[in-house]
Image (tube, grey):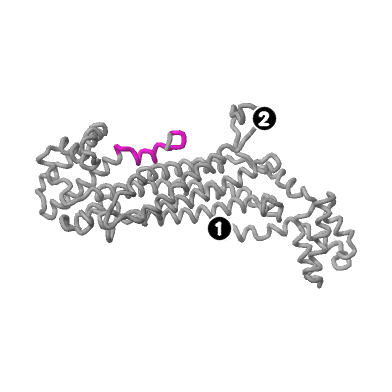
Amino acid sequence: MIPRYSRPEMVAIWSPETKFRIWFEIEAHACDAMAELGVIPKENAEAVWKAKDVEFDVARIDEIEAVTKHDVIAFLTHLAEIVGNDEARFVHQGMTSSDVLDTCFNVQLTRAADILIADLEGLLAALKRRAYEHKDTVRIGRSHGIHAEPTTMGLTFARFYAEMDRNLSRMRDARAEIATGAISGAVGTFANIDPRVEEHVCDRLGLVPEPVSTQVIPRDRHAAFFATLGVIASSIENIATEIRHMQRTEVLEGEEFFSKGQKGSSAMPHKRNPVLTENLTGLARLVRGMVIPAMENVALWHERDISHSSVERNIGPDATVTLDFALARLTGVIDKLVIYPDRMLENLHKFRGLVMSQRVLLALTQAGVSREDAYALVQRNAMKVWEEGKDFKTELLGDPDVTKVLSNEAIEEKFDLGYHTKHVDTIFARVFGED
């Protein structure tokens, strides 16, 4: 997590100040619940809230931790310095460190999820706008990087929209699954704290109680959360890769917006490189790289160990901050992406009608020719285009084995581009839910 690839709102979620503020709220709400239950004096619970508007001294907490070698105890000591030792004597009663750490971590993840959900919604809006803008912009579809059959740029955007819409659903599900809290005490039995305290704290923090916390919240929830981030990152790379291919000099059907004063190369002044989408490809690798450690965190010893802790202190901020930045960057790329429709048509016709071969094949079979013979007829004419630079339609019209089955008019009709775009509206209705 470095400033170059970070946005302030997401970074703030993971700041020490935010973390200690959440820790305070967990402890204060727990005291309120215990006071309501008559476990501790009400005045002591009220006294804890004296720290409500206090800026916790991160340096002081670090100083205490250097001695205690325990972060939660260091925070509790600092809190007692603020509210008074006697007033704070019931803070953390019946609780264990994981109650604070795990509940806080899930609060942070839910807040991060809210930002990522908003990011995805913004990206979807951009993709939808560009899809309708280029719904009928014909381009060549490719399989294996080779010309296949005509499609439209709008369908390309619609495909990415549908993929990101699935990711939005996944992100919402991941948020719901991670939004649990635990205030259950040592080994999660509630022996020293009433389950109603947990219910109160979770309600105040927008969480639901973890059914069985065993002192830690089960890490399968976190594995699913980070796996979702990894899938979203892969989808970002999927879109970025398409744009990078579009911007290749030999293709140049689209390119990233190149601003005034921008430089593409320190050595070659002519260069306009797809630097943003290449950057997104790299950032996607980083996010995916944090999924496996999250998976490996699921297996903990007995009721609790802290082998997951060091991992999460890294991947929590890094994965969410990186993905937030990547989604925002991709939205900007899509918004400003320059499309070249004329170049798309030029590329489509580069091999002189070759991409209509399937239509001719199907017409021959429908006219009574066996599929094997029809394939051979079409392929021998197609190979002349590849190898000799011939025109496909001209070759078909000059092939007596073809023309004895198909009339000239029938052959001409097979080169109509509109044939390939006749169901674009149907696909758009499926994707966008509109007529």
Reading the image, the residue beneath label 2 is 270
Q: Position of residue 171 (x, y in %)?
A: 43, 53
State yes or no: residue 239 in magenta.
Answer: no
Location of the N terminus by quadrant is top left
Q: Would you say 2 lies left or right of 162 here?
A: left
Q: Is residue 376 above or below residue 101?
A: below
Q: Is residue 244 above or below residue 386?
A: above
Reading the image, the residue beneath label 1 is 431
404 and 214: which is toward the camera: 214
Name the N-terminal-most of marks 1 and 2: 2
Q: Is residue 435 visible?
A: no
Q: Please report the residue visible at 85 percent of the width from the left and 50 percent of the height from the top.
A: 388
Per the image, label 2 sits on a secondary structure element best described as loop
Q: Is residue 30 visible?
A: yes
Name which residue type carries label 1.
Val
Per the image, label 1 sits on a secondary structure element best described as helix
- Magenta segment, which residues? 3-17
Q: Please report the residue visible at 19 percent of the width from the left and 54 percent of the height from the top.
A: 197
State yes or no: residue 4 in magenta.
Answer: yes
Q: Position of residue 308 (x, y in %)?
A: 34, 49
Q: Residues within 10 Å of mark 1 (few under 14, many from 20)?
A: some
Q: Position of residue 209 (x, y in %)?
A: 27, 57
* Quarter of the rendering containing residue 16: top left
- Give the number of marks: 2
Q: Please report the residue visible at 65 percent of the width from the left and 32 percent of the height from the top.
A: 271
Q: Residues within 10 Å of mark 2 (few under 14, many from 20)?
A: few
Name which residue type carries label 2.
His
